[in-house]
Image (cartoon, rainbow, N blue to C red):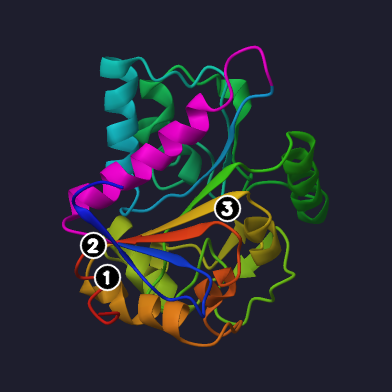
Amino acid sequence: MRDDVKELSFPDSGLKVWRCDTEAAVDMAAADLAEEVIRSKPAGKAGPVLGVATGSTPEGLYAELVRRHREQGLSFANVTSFNLDEYLGLYPGHDQSYRYFMVHQLFMHVDIKYENTFVPSGLEWNMEKHVQEYEELIRAKGGIDLQVLGIGGNAHIGFNEPGSAKDSRTRVVALEESTREANSRFFDNDISKVPTHAISMGVATVLEAKKVILMAKGEGKADAVAKSVKGPATPHVPASLLQGHPDCIFILDPGAASLLE
């Protein structure tokens, strides 16, 4: 483990919790785990499958992976990626679509093949068929080796808002007002521009990933983190449903960990 990372003990939850000295240490620790998974499956074999998240929290992770690609030869040529979610109604070229985010934060800067990057479409006319096919495609690729998550202020993961069932699958979800308010900063601080619905992998889809890392930064996430780690596993706190996953690590900066110590 890195010198700037300390493991906290919460045996009742089954979660591993890493408290990092800085935000940058969060990014580095997450990048170390991602690189380990990417390098674990060399070219010529079934490649690693990454579940990727959007939002401001993982930006540093992607920047570090880009640096390692450019300076250390970390190759994404054998990687397949699946996005956690996408806004309903936004076309891929919209500057707030999650396809656009991933292209500009990661895909265009590394050697990943475009045909190996999968993002739910917010424009499908037959959404029921589309989300079922998304689930089937994940399974066809061998499942997700590493799922990257952030956490919302209400403890949502992906767009699984409070009340999402543990057995939920990829589906269309209605976004809570608090989620839309938090995301309005990306839409000129105008909540009326924030879509009201999104497509999200379900909780069960996330739990099937072989390894899960949840990144959280800032005191604004401390309450959600504390409830997820120390409280009961309940659909009212979606991230708490990660308790008991065989290999789930919460990677936190001092602010996000402030209510755990």
Q: CA distance from mark 1 to mark 3?
A: 32 Å
Residue tagged by mark 2? 253
Q: Which residues are magenta?
A: 19-45
Q: Residue furthest top?
A: 44
Disc 3 packing (10 Å; few <14; some 14–19; many ≥20): some
Number of disc labels: 3
Disc number for residue 184: none
The location of residue 169, given as percent across then percent down, is 73, 62
Q: What quarter of the picture does the C terminus occupy?
A: bottom left
Residue tagged by mark 3? 89
The location of residue 13, given as percent across then percent down, is 51, 77
Q: Secondary structure at mark 2?
A: loop
Q: Nearer the viewer, residue 1 or 236?
A: 1
Residue tagged by mark 1? 256
Q: Quadrant of residue 214?
A: bottom left
Q: Magenta segment, principal secondary structure? A: helix
The residue at 59%/14% (across/down) is: 43
- Relative to 183, is 224 above or below? below
Q: Secondary structure at mark 3?
A: loop
Question: What amino acid does circle 2 point to?
Answer: Asp
Q: CA distance from mark 3 to mark 2?
A: 34 Å
The location of residue 73, given as percent across then percent down, is 35, 14
Whether the residues at callouts 1 and 2 have beta carbons within 8 Å, the answer is yes
